[in-house]
Image: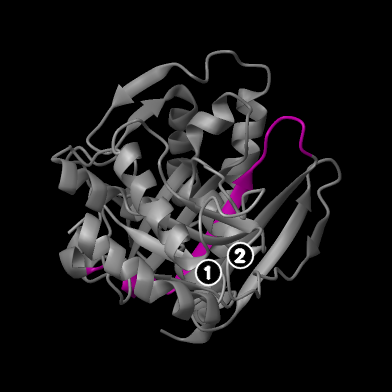
Amino acid sequence: MSPAILERARRLLCALQDHIRDTLRRTSRGSRDMARIAAVTAADTIYAIDRISEDAICAWFDAHWPKAWSVELVMEGLEDGSVTTFPRGTPVEKTVFKCILDPIDGTRGLMYDKRSAWILAGLAPQRGARTHLGDIVVAAMTELPTSKQGLADQLSAVRGAGLRCTRFDLATGRRTRFVPRPATGTDCRHGFASFVRFFPEGRVLMAQLEEALWDELYGVGRGASPIIFDDQYISTGGQLYEIIVGHDRLIGDLRPLVFKKLGLRAELSCHPYDIGPAFLLKEAGGVIEAPGGGPLCAPLDTTTPVAWIGYANPALARKIRPVLRRLIGEKLI
């Protein structure tokens, strides 16, 4: 596809996410019912706040998506056997694009007004069931701010064309460009580096692997104060953002491996719709990969468990990767 088409697609994804953000801000302001459970699906629990975004998305695609670019929409909330295409009724095999979308990644933090959530989207040429994360050529992620925030960020890119970042003033509507700078250090000492363990399931095993990693690399308990700081941001998009802007040096989500090792169900894992904008980290100069090495290549669906490791820079990845992979082999495989 031509650069001009992909650039227009990037702008469209950003406009869609602006619409979702603004709709949620208008609708949820002052509401006490956003935490109500609306449905339980194969992918996740759906809350009332999620339903607002789903309605806004379909209305936007109907009104704004180019008819010549027929698209299949893969989204949390649509995974129970339904097929959604635009223009409506287009057979999936006739669509040009597949768009994977998470309307609100980090719902639980946002609906209690604790921390920003993120809208995540990736667009790939349609290859049917063979379409995977590595096929995504356009991606965008937009911050859904807490009620006391005055600014919200948006990151987007066409693969290989560099990251574009804007900061939106929620009061004035003004946008300003900014250039994120991932951390440049070659170790994690005195910085934030975390492995996902949001829930009780698998927490002990994950913590054991993490402690073994830091002990081998830097030593644990050998000084008067800790040298690695942990931050459990319950949003995959938020985690990517924290690495991209230089707050975190490493984040690993090994839940699928941990759950498999323990014989647990994998619903509480990262899924492709959570990690669709993964290549934005690469565009910023970081590294994102499968725990065993190589690119992420899960199918564009809402149920496949995805394990991943993100590093702030290649030098950091080269130092940590061999030790981490060996420990994963010893403890999780």
Q: Is residue 148 magenta?
A: yes
Contact between marks 1 and 2 (CB within 8 A): the answer is: yes
Q: Element at badge 2?
A: helix
Q: Is residue 8 shown to the viewer in this render? A: no
Front-most of residues 297 and 88: 297
Circle 2 sits on which residue? 244
Label placed on residue 281: 1
x then y, percent, for residue 197: 40, 41
- The crowding category of the residue bearing disc 2, from other C-alpha atoms within 10 Å (few below 14, some 14 to 19, many at least 20), is many
- What residue range appears in magenta? 131-149
Q: How was this image coloured?
A: one colour
Tell me which amino acid carries mark 2: Ile
Front-most of residues 302 and 308: 308
Residue furthest top in the image: 32
x then y, percent, for residue 101: 41, 51
In the image, what residue occupies the spot 26% across and 53% down?
A: 301
In the image, what residue occupies the spot 31% across and 57% down?
A: 307
x then y, percent, for residue 29: 67, 23
